[in-house]
Image (tube, rainbow, N blue to C red):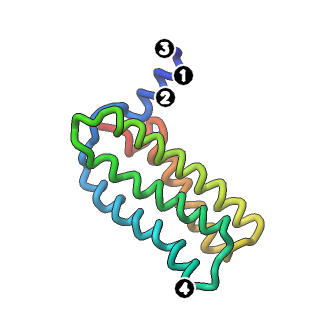
Amino acid sequence: MSQLVRWFMKGFFWGPPSHKRVAWLGGLAGLVVVALPLVIAVFGKGGHPLFLLALAFAGLAETGWAVELLPRRQIMLAGWGRVARWLCAIVGLALAAISTLAQLAPVWFAGIVAFGALLLIFEMGPGGFANRP
């Protein structure tokens, strides 16, 4: 196994789900954030699709906390779930940054989404707080 692969797998704490209490709160909060673009699209003034996607990906990253609630024997699924939630946060940050720079959404709202996604990247990334036993 290469050094990069070992760092990658170790950094994401490729172990059993942690069952941290914050996983419930994070998972539920993520569901609210995932629902927000749908509510904006249906009941709001529409919103630009790129910004709504940024919001959806940031919500998926937050919903990814639910992977920590899997049964303890689901080690591989938990590891890939941690990688997926980190990648969702990266995509959410990129789309929110583009939305901010292109002024596709109110700057304060796109900025909040971008900042939140950035925090999720650091929190959920290799060696981050969320990936420690």
Q: CA distance from mark 3 to mark 1?
A: 8 Å
| Res. 26 image quadrant | bottom left
Neighbours of disc 2 within 10 Å: few (<14), some (14-19), many (20+)? some
SS type, badge 4: helix
Q: CA distance from mark 4 to mark 2?
A: 42 Å
Residue 4's label in the rendered image is 1
Question: Is the Cβ of the residue at disc 2 closer than 8 Å to that at disc 3?
Answer: no
Earlier in the chain: of badge 4 and badge 3, it is 3
Which is nearer the eye, 130 or 30? Answer: 30
Return the residue at label 3: 1
Question: Is the Cβ of the residue at disc 1 closer than 8 Å to that at disc 4?
Answer: no
Q: CA distance from mark 1 to mark 4?
A: 46 Å
Give the foreground label among 1 and 4: 4
Question: Where does residue 84 sit, x and y in percent of width and height?
Answer: 48, 44
| Res. 52 image quadrant | bottom right
Q: Is residue 15 above or below residue 60?
A: above
Question: Is the Cβ of the residue at disc 4 closer than 8 Å to that at disc 2?
Answer: no
SS type, badge 3: loop
Please report the residue visible at 58 percent of the width from the left and 85 percent of the height from the top: 44
Return the residue at label 4: 43
Location of the C terminus by quadrant is top left
Return the residue at label 2: 8
Q: CA distance from mark 4 to mark 3?
A: 51 Å
Question: Where does residue 19 sit, x and y in percent of width and height?
Answer: 24, 47
Please report the residue visible at 41 percent of the width from the left and 70 percent of the height from the top: 32
